[in-house]
Image (cartoon, rainbow, N blue to C red):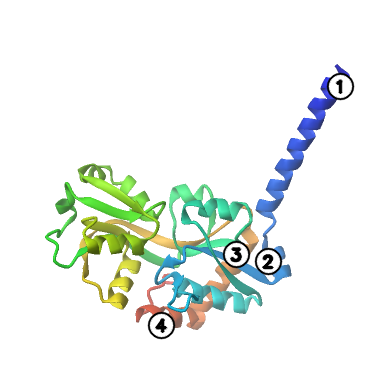
Amino acid sequence: MKKKMLAICMTALMAIGIFSGCSSKQSGNSWDKVSAKKEFVLGLDASFPPMGFKDDNGNIVGFDIDLAKEVCKRLNITLKTQPINWDLKEQELNTGNIDAIWNGFTITDERKSQVLFSEPYMKNRQVIVVNKNSSIASLKDMAGKKLGLQAASSAADALDQSADFKKSLKDVVEYKDNVMALMDLEKGGVDAVLMDEIVARYYIQKKDKGYKVLDDALAQEEYGIGFRKNDKELMRKFQDTLEAMAKDGAMAKISKDWFGADITTIGK
């Protein structure tokens, strides 16, 4: 009996130790830790222009990257960009592999239950992109058609929340990223792609592709930065810095460099 009780106690202690270790790892990347190591690890999908993506030289660039660089400069820390599997973004965050998710990260109620969001800094819509010569002109025209989208994206969330529209479709095809979805659209693999309007319009403008964006939008949304639930101090440091950048014009300048206008929402 004593041996059995000892074994039970040892098992319980090990479980507590493991749990404590996990909790420690999840909550350890506070502002104090980031400040001490002088490095902030930003997790992103590196195929999400213009927010964060690899340029022709393999460098990670983008609107969100420029924002993060300026924030880190003002906080006297170094920015490290870490490409991640977008399907596992919350896991990457909560296991401590990254300090935040910052890459056109749409704020949703479901995501709020898993991460701590900053205040929104930009608005966006989920829109339908079709080939320029397509006969599809509205959401109703999508009945019986094949729709492509990025897996585990806010487009997928928006589609799930639009049950009637989803039911009207012939098929939904998921891709690793929006670029692959648009390439398949161009080849005729799908009839349309559901994606972020900001990304769609940037891609059409920069790549000079024969796509068009429908006027109808499936959902309205906002972008924010996602932190671990316990990292309130770290989130506040970044939020305060973004607000200072909005006041002194630095945020507007970065927005104009990427979009030709200030389309940010902080302080407005």
> What residue is drawn where x is 46% and y is 72%?
54
Residue receiving disc 2: 34
Determine if residue 241 is in view. yes
Mark 2 Cα-neighbour bin, 10 Å: few <14, some 14–19, many ≥20: some
Closer to the camera in the image, 31 or 183: 183
> What residue is drawn where x is 24% and y is 56%?
189
Circles 1 and 4 in contact, beta carbons < 8 Å: no
Q: Secondary structure at mark 3?
A: helix
Kindly report the distance in space between the C-alpha atoms of the residues bearing marks 2 and 3.
13 Å
Q: Earlier in the sequence, mark 1 or mark 2?
A: 1
Which residue lies most toward the left here?
135
Residue receiving disc 3: 236
Tally of numbered discs? 4
Residue receiving disc 1: 3
Q: Secondary structure at mark 1?
A: helix
Task: Indicate which disc residue 257 carries.
Answer: 4
Q: Earlier in the sequence, mark 1 or mark 4?
A: 1
